[in-house]
Image (cartoon, rainbow, N blue to C red):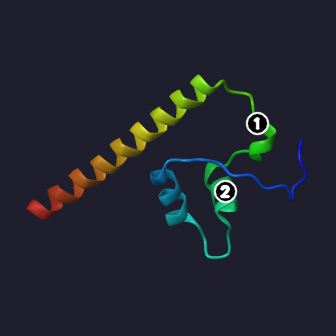
């Protein structure tokens, strides 16, 4: 495992980056925000556990859930706007 000073680039969908940025506290780095929000261990501790296929499936499910939640919120807002 690399040192804590070691940095790398990770490609994520733009919607995910925007979501983390929206939940980031002023004093946090993007990584710190992601780690806090996910409640998970340091990524280096779990790297390689999932196959690329499993990881892609998980990302697809997370994205679908996020889209569903956003649609539900829009529907609720629209219901109030219509009344």
> What x and y, as percent, mark residue 14?
47, 53
- Which residue is the site of mark 1? 46
Residue at far bottom of view: 26
Judge whether 70 appears above or below 57 on screen: below
* Quarter where residue 4 is shown: bottom right
Provide the secondary structure element on which disc 1 rests: helix
Q: Position of residue 74 (x, y in %)?
A: 25, 54
Q: In front here: 48 or 72?
A: 48
Position of residue 23 in the picture relative to residue 7 (left or right): left
Q: Which mark is in front, 1 or 2? A: 1
Q: Residue at x 36, y 44 (%)?
A: 67
How crowded pointer 1 is (Cα within 10 Å; few <14, some 14-19, many 20+) is rated as few
Say left or right for 63 vs 71: right
* Quadrant of the snapshot with the N terminus: top right
The C terminus sits in image quarter: bottom left
Q: Secondary structure at mark 2?
A: helix
Q: Say if 4 sits above or below 67 in the image.
A: below
Q: Does residue 70 appear left or right of residue 33 in this picture?
A: left
Q: Are marks 1 and 2 in contact (CB under 8 Å)?
A: no
Q: Residue 19: percent from the left, percent from the top?
A: 49, 57
**Residue that numbered label 2 is attached to:** 36
Q: Which of the pair 48/36 is nearer the observer?
A: 48
**Residue 48's image quarter?**
top right
- Mark drawn on residue 16: none
Q: Residue shown at 59%/30% (left/top)?
A: 55
At horizontal 62% and vertical 27% (from top left) the residue drawn is: 52
User: Which residue is located at x 70 percent, y 61 percent?
Assistant: 32
The mark that comes first in sequence, 1 or 2, is 2
- Frontmost residue, 42 versus 48: 48
Q: Is residue 33 left or right of residue 4?
A: left
């Amino acid at each position: 495992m690399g040192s804590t000073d070691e940095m790398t680039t990770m490609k994520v969908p733009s919607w995910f980056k925007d979501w983390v940025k929206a939940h980031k506290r002023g004093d946090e780095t993007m990584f710190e925000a992601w780690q806090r929000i996910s409640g998970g261990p340091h990524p280096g501790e779990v790297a390689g556990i999932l196959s690329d296929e499993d990881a892609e499936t998980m990302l697809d499910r997370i994205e679908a859930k996020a889209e569903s939640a956003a649609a539900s919120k829009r529907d609720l807002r629209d219901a109030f706007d219509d009344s």
